[in-house]
Amino acid sequence: MPENRNAIIVVCSILQMVPETDSKFHSELKELIMDSAYSAPELLYSVESWRKLENIMHKYIPVVDTPLKQKIVEEYIGEPFMVAQAQARAQVQAPEQEVKHRVMS
């Protein structure tokens, strides 16, 4: 199981990707960072911090329809999750390919 991630570190990463022309998205991410400035460190890993970020993400990226949005969502989700999903897909596809090979032989 992957380690818990600090939501604010993820927010900072996402903030760097969001164009400044998207001022409302930029502003809400900055506000989330400022609100967490005096929080106890363990709270930055909490479900509550992630829910706040999740709400912002859903508000500004309801649909992943550009490469930039895809990159932002991947940062939000996290690489360990993406790797696990890719491995799961590979495991599902491997038996299907084996069956096709047996049928064709």
Image (cartoon, rainbow, N blue to C red):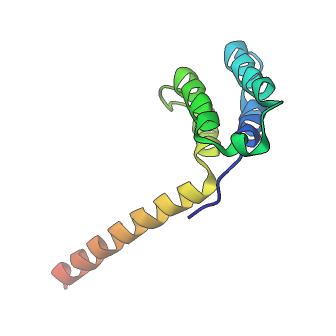
27 or 90: which is nearer to us? 27
Number of disc labels: 0
Residue 92 picture quarter: bottom left
Residue name at image x 58 percent, y 40 percent: 47
49 or 83: which is nearer to us? 49
- Quarter of the figure with the N terminus: bottom right
Residue 96 picture quarter: bottom left
Location of residue 87 in the rendering, given as x and y in whole percent from the top left corner: 47, 66
- Horizontal side of 69 relative to 22 (left or right) equals left
Residue name at image x 78 percent, y 39 percent: 40
- Quarter of the figure with the C terminus: bottom left
- Horizontal side of 32 relative to 63 (left or right) equals right
Work out whether 7 lies above or below 22.
below
Residue name at image x 77 percent, y 28 percent: 33
- Horizontal side of 93 relative to 46 (left or right) equals left
Location of residue 18 in the rendering, given as x and y in whole percent from the top left corner: 72, 27
Please identify the residue farthest to the left as the structure is shown: 103
Location of residue 61 in the rendering, given as x and y in whole percent from the top left corner: 54, 26
Location of residue 50 in the rendering, given as x and y in whole percent from the top left corner: 60, 37
Residue name at image x 52 percent, y 26 percent: 58
